[in-house]
Image (cartoon, rainbow, N blue to C red):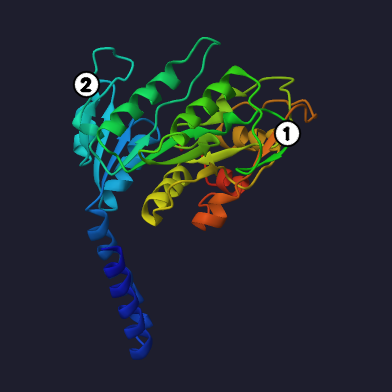
Amino acid sequence: MDFIVMLYQRMFHLYLLKQNLYKKYSLFRIISINLANVNNAKQIISVLGCGWFGLPLARKLVESGFEVKGSVTQKSKLDLLSNYGIDAHQINLNDNTFSGSSFFKCDVLIICIPGSVKSADDNDYYYAVQKSLIYACKAKVKHVILISSIGVYTDVNTIVDERSLIKANDHKSKILLNTEELLNHQKDFTATIVRFGGLIGAQRNLAKYFAGKRQVPQGLAPINLIALQDCIGITLQIIEQKAFGYTYNAVCPHHPTRADFYTALAKNTGYEIPEFVCKKGTWKQVDSFNVPHILNYKFIVNNWFNWIAEQSINSL
């Protein structure tokens, strides 16, 4: 089906060239999008965890023509998913009574479980992912995408990317890395890891955590953030390009200092401006090799100060 879609697109493209009809290029785009949606409609995507990222991702997948299943832990949120055309399921992997669901019968499973590790004996995240993989294998899922975190990298005072050797020397980074390795050791499906930077946008204004504070450390350290629209964009590109089997650092390539970024953000969104210690301290800069080279992805938010200029007190 992919070959047929590409063939029709190429034939129509050549027709436009021959007839000099590029002023009608918008028609070509409409046909291309519709052909892509026909192809996407054959695939079933399950989004495990329809929260801050998972829900808008699921909505975008529906818009793109995929059949989408989504999960929440609370019954009260099922109608919200259904209203967006998502096949809604209530799933709590920490519930010992849970024994599986038709939710896992899909082509692509996207695991969007929050990777919070609150204490040294907190392994809930690891076991929840492990449990989901058991059900994925039983359902013969072809591809599994784990939404991970750049928290796998500790502050090593250098620039890192997907090719860097990871030295997990604290509990959080060890849990995140061990969870990623759960996928990479599997042979029943193709594993893809997407490591998000710090998340910002859509009711997530990080300036409030620094508002009015004094002597905030690491003022000269670089930020490693990603906007919600790029979280969605990168994940969608992986699926549509079928670029499975890789690890992607999903981080905006613009890395201003913490002091410059949070001062500007606080000022523009109405928070009291914090004061930073003008030292770098321990730091890391997380870049990506695979996002530009494998996906050829162009970031929607590629300059944080331009993005800040578009924000207001009520926009975040």
Q: In the image, what residue occupies the spot 63% across and 31% down?
A: 153
Residue 58 lies left or right of residue 257; in this view the side is left
Question: For numbered disc 1, what is the local secondary structure?
Answer: loop
Q: Amino acid at mark 1?
A: Ala
Toward the bottom, the furthest residue is: 19
Q: In the image, what residue occupies the spot 80% across and 29% down?
A: 279
Q: Which mark is residue 75?
A: 2
**Is 240 in front, or is 169?**
169
Question: For numbered disc 2, what is the local secondary structure?
Answer: helix
How packed is label 2: few (under 14 Cα within 10 Å), some, or many (20 or more)? few
**Is 164 in front, or is 284?**
164
In the rendering, at what x and y percent does residue 238 appear? Answer: 42, 50
Q: What residue does disc 1 label?
A: 221
**Is 24 in front, or is 267?**
24
Name above or below for residue 270 compared with residue 44: above
How packed is label 1: few (under 14 Cα within 10 Å), some, or many (20 or more)? many
Name above or below for residue 5 compared with residue 131: below
**Is 118 in front, or is 210?**
118
CA–CA distance between discs 1 and 2? 42 Å
Toward the right, the furthest residue is: 279
Q: Amino acid at mark 2?
A: Lys
Q: Which mark is residue 86?
A: none
Residue 296 lies left or right of residue 211; in this view the side is left
Q: Quadrant of residue 202?
A: top left
Q: In the image, what residue occupies the spot 69% across and 41% down?
A: 256
Q: Quadrant of residue 284?
A: top right
**Can you see residue 37?**
yes
